[in-house]
Image (cartoon, rainbow, N blue to C red):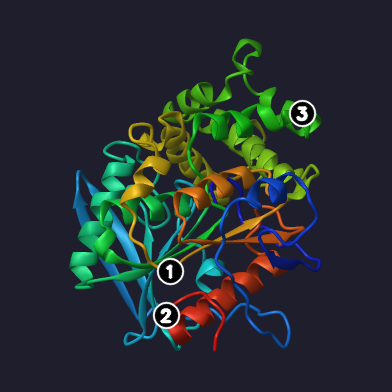
């Protein structure tokens, strides 16, 4: 995902294709948008596969001091699939690879520059979207692959779309969850606009900034994380994480966020929080520059995307990557299918999202598209 860390969310969820629900705003707008059908017969909700150890690990130097950490999971003879993590800066999650049947997929998991186990972690020098696209070209050449299924959520969906426009011949299909378009409005919404829905949680986050910077938090955040002041960064990283979780859950989630240690009390360094600092350093760097997707915009770049099986999955209650973005993307990709998930926000672990992702990947492994099996 673009912002929040993975949090377990319980409760039932129900998926339905676009345009089949009540006449709310999304359905009213989408009624005029052609949508491919998507359905899978099911005996019950699909669940995650067990995690498996990598069968191959790569350390891929890509220049400027960056070395990418890449793992391959599943089956060496399986369908090649590239999994793009969110963030930017989050690193690959064990949970996300559990959407894939390890007996049918050769799953390629790359920690992007500055993220996860790639080194140097948290480094924002020579780290832009253009660099990541070059890294994907280098990785595909290194692995000797002609084409791959590309799967991504949130920022991972952003990068997947940019990669498809950059190398359309390399993409066999696209499975995109909670798509993020990196528009100015998307960023304003997250850092200020959505505060009307969560005023107390936003105030807790914004109070870390000087009063005169609170209506434009992103430049201030990027400055703080670039300065490498550990104590200051830990407090702000913890607050940022809590803000994300509040948006994802609809309520304050302070207890589940990594908490800042107090050096004055002799508290030990919190490795999870320090990793979060590195993640937010990369993330604020990318978001400050709107991910270098202004000219041309990501939607404009979609004109170069290949006409391949493309499924967009989006929660109707997503308050981080709003549903309107999925509609805009669907219009730009008329061959795509857009499936709404009722009662689902941004959390990839929601049972309805897990079910939709697992079934889509099962269907693609069986027949090479995301449509209904014969």
**Residue 214, percent from left and from top:** 64, 18
Residue 18 visible? The answer is yes
Please determine whether, in this image, residue 92 is positioned above or below residue 227: below
The answer to the question of whether label 1 and label 3 lie on touching residues, with beta carbons closer than 8 A, is: no
In the orientation shown, which residue stands out farthest toward the front?
32
Q: Which mark is residue 309?
A: 1
Classify mark 2: residues with Cα within 10 Å, few (<14), some (14-19) or many (20+).
Answer: some
Classify mark 3: residues with Cα within 10 Å, few (<14), some (14-19) or many (20+).
Answer: few
Q: Which mark is residue 196?
A: 3
In 3D space, how far apart are the residues under numbered discs 1 and 2 (Cα atoms)? Answer: 8 Å
Asked which secondary structure carries label 2, the reply is: loop
Q: Which residue is mark 2?
A: 368
Quadrant in the rendering for residue 8: bottom right
**Residue 36, percent from left and from top:** 55, 66
Quadrant in the rendering for residue 206: top right
Viewer-closest of 166 and 247: 166
The answer to the question of whether label 1 and label 2 lie on touching residues, with beta carbons closer than 8 A, is: yes
Asked which secondary structure carries label 3, the reply is: helix
Please name the residue shown 81% across and 44% down the image: 251
Asked which secondary structure carries label 1, the reply is: loop
Please determine whether, in this image, residue 150 is positioned above or below residue 235: below
């Amino acid at each position: 995902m673009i912002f929040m860390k993975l949090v377990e969310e319980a409760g039932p969820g129900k998926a339905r294709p676009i345009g089949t629900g009540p006449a709310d705003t999304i359905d009213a707008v989408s009624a005029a948008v052609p949508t491919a059908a998507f359905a899978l017969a099911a005996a019950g909700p699909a669940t995650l596969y067990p995690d498996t150890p990598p069968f191959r690990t790569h350390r891929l130097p890509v220049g400027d001091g960056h070395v990418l950490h890449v793992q391959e999971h599943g089956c060496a003879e399986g369908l090649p699939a590239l999994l793009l993590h969110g963030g930017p800066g989050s690193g690959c999650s064990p949970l996300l690879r559990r959407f894939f049947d390890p007996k049918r997929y050769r799953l390629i998991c790359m920690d992007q520059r500055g993220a996860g186990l790639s080194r140097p972690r948290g480094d924002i020098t020579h780290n832009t979207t253009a660099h990541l696209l070059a890294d994907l070209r280098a990785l595909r050449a290194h692995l000797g692959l002609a084409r791959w299924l590309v799967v991504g959520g949130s920022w991972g969906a952003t990068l997947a779309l940019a990669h498809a426009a950059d190398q359309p011949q390399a993409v066999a299909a696209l499975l995109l969850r909670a798509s993020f378009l990196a528009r100015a409005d998307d960023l304003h919404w997250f850092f200020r606009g959505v505060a009307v829905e969560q005023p107390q949680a936003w105030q807790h986050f914004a109070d870390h900034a000087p009063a005169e910077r609170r209506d434009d938090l992103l430049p201030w955040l990027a400055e703080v994380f670039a300065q490498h002041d550990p104590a200051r960064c830990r407090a702000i990283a913890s607050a940022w994480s809590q803000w994300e979780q509040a948006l994802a859950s609809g309520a304050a989630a302070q207890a589940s966020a990594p908490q800042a240690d107090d050096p004055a009390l002799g508290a030990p360094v919190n490795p999870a929080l320090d990793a979060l600092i590195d993640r937010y350093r990369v993330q604020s760097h990318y978001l400050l520059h709107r991910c270098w997707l202004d000219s041309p915009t990501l939607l404009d770049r979609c004109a170069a995307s290949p006409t391949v099986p493309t499924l967009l999955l989006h929660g109707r209650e997503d308050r981080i990557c709003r549903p309107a973005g999925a509609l805009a993307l669907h219009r730009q990709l008329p061959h795509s299918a857009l499936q709404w998930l009722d009662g689902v926000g941004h959390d990839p672990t929601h049972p309805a999202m897990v079910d939709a992702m697992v079934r889509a990947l099962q269907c693609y492994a069986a027949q090479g598209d995301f449509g209904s099996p014969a």
